[in-house]
Amino acid sequence: MIVARTGASSDTGLSTVLPGSGRAEAERSDHAMVPFLLGSAEETIAGFGIKAALAPVPAEDLKEAERVFRAAHPDVSLIVGILPFDRAAPAHLYAPETVTTVWPARVADSTIAPTAGAGWSSAAEPPPAEYAAAVEKALSLFASEQHLQKVVLARSLVVTAPTNIDIDAVLARLARDRSITTFAAPLPSTSGASPRALIGATPELLVDKRGAAVRSAPLAGSARRHADKKADELSAAGLLASEKDLREHAFVVEAILDTLSPYCRDLRAPSSPSLVSTDSMWHLGTTVEGTLKDRDTPVIELAAALHPTPAVCGLPREAAREAIAALETVDRGYYAGAVGWTDQNGDGRWMVAIRCAEFSGRNARLFAGAGIVPGSDPWSEVAETSAKFSALLSALGIDETGSTGERPVNGNGGAP
Ligand SMILES: C=C(O[C@@H]1C=C(C(=O)O)C=C[C@H]1O)C(=O)O
């Protein structure tokens, strides 16, 4: 049986949102616990403290865990948190003590300086050549395991700063890109260790549900942006015409339609993807929209059903998950998970937790992945993952080698 864990008992939730009241909270210099944040040009939710946490259950039990929690906490409106990549691992969801719908003051300060200075170091884990070798192995799996169609392989970059990294400064710099959703999710702490948080700038909507309206906006298929306008346009045009990227993209849209259709009385998606851009990347994107048969379907049920999509895992899901477990050397943890919120009506928004890093004290582990399908080129995937690191790296004020100088990010990765 699922049992809700309880904490302090002050009132909380969207019903008690006090616009502007986040400022005093945010201006505390105490970062012992990073606030929850999910903020975009469209909507911001920031939560401070933990009033009470849901039972730490895997994705398939989240609907029931939310029901049990709400029965024990009828005063709670807003629940926030993060699901790890692994569906079988426990999610970290909780009701914050206070919630606001404004950017915390320091995060809203776009003039905030980068944290960089001398004395940073970086290490690619695995090194780029090992990642390329893992992509080769994935390509050979397509030949031997006929049913495997796509697998998303990730790599990581561990950066170490001379002093504790200023999380608010990183968030403020990430938020300068108005096309993405800036997020921060405190992670469960291990005793004695520094508090951990997943911080990032995701462009990808897993699911948004308001009343009976449901929407998902998967991305798959990527190309680096360029400062030079002509080169940037060529990069975008190449992506739109790439047979490999269109194939990679179609798997994701199909899986999302398949997952959502039992819940919907109508569901629609354009027949071909559009270009979606962030400051650093071009993507192929498709917006899937539908009307739920039952408007009371909780968004957490939809997020748990969709997660992880073939955009971050592969197809079929279980075979891709096994390939990831065999080929990746670093545990994804909450990277490629789902970060979001839900209210007492079951409405809410969940984003795919990508373009992010796990922060703890002086360290950050950045993650980036790329979809591999038959026809993928291993070193192009190394370059694509390098490009995907760049949003976080520029927010930190460093390049892939850990340098704070003007050196451009090396397309072949940053082994020190
Ligand atoms: C896995 C990541 O990104 C995902 C993979 C993409 C791709 O393979 O083209 C594109 C967008 C995301 O769905 C990542 O950024 O780490």
Image: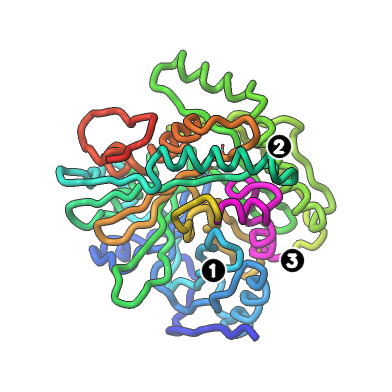
- For the residues carrying marks 1 and 3, which lies nearer the camera in this image? 1
Quadrant in which ligand 1 is drawn: top right
Task: Name the residue type under label 1.
Answer: Ala
Check if residue 321 falls in the magenta segment. Answer: yes
Q: Residue at x 33, y 50 (%)?
A: 158
Q: Residue 53 location, x and y as percent? A: 50, 77
Q: Residue 89 location, x and y as percent? A: 55, 68
Q: Is residue 180 above or below residue 352?
A: above
How far apart, in angstroms, are the residues tagged by discs 1 and 3?
22 Å
Residue linked to disc 3: 296
Task: Name the residue type under label 3.
Answer: Asp
Disc 1 or 2, which lies upstream in sequence? 1
Q: Residue 256 location, x and y as percent? A: 72, 48
Residue linked to disc 1: 91
Check if residue 332 falls in the magenta segment. Answer: no
Question: Along the horizontal axis of the image, is 6 left or right of 396?
Answer: right
Residue linked to disc 2: 250
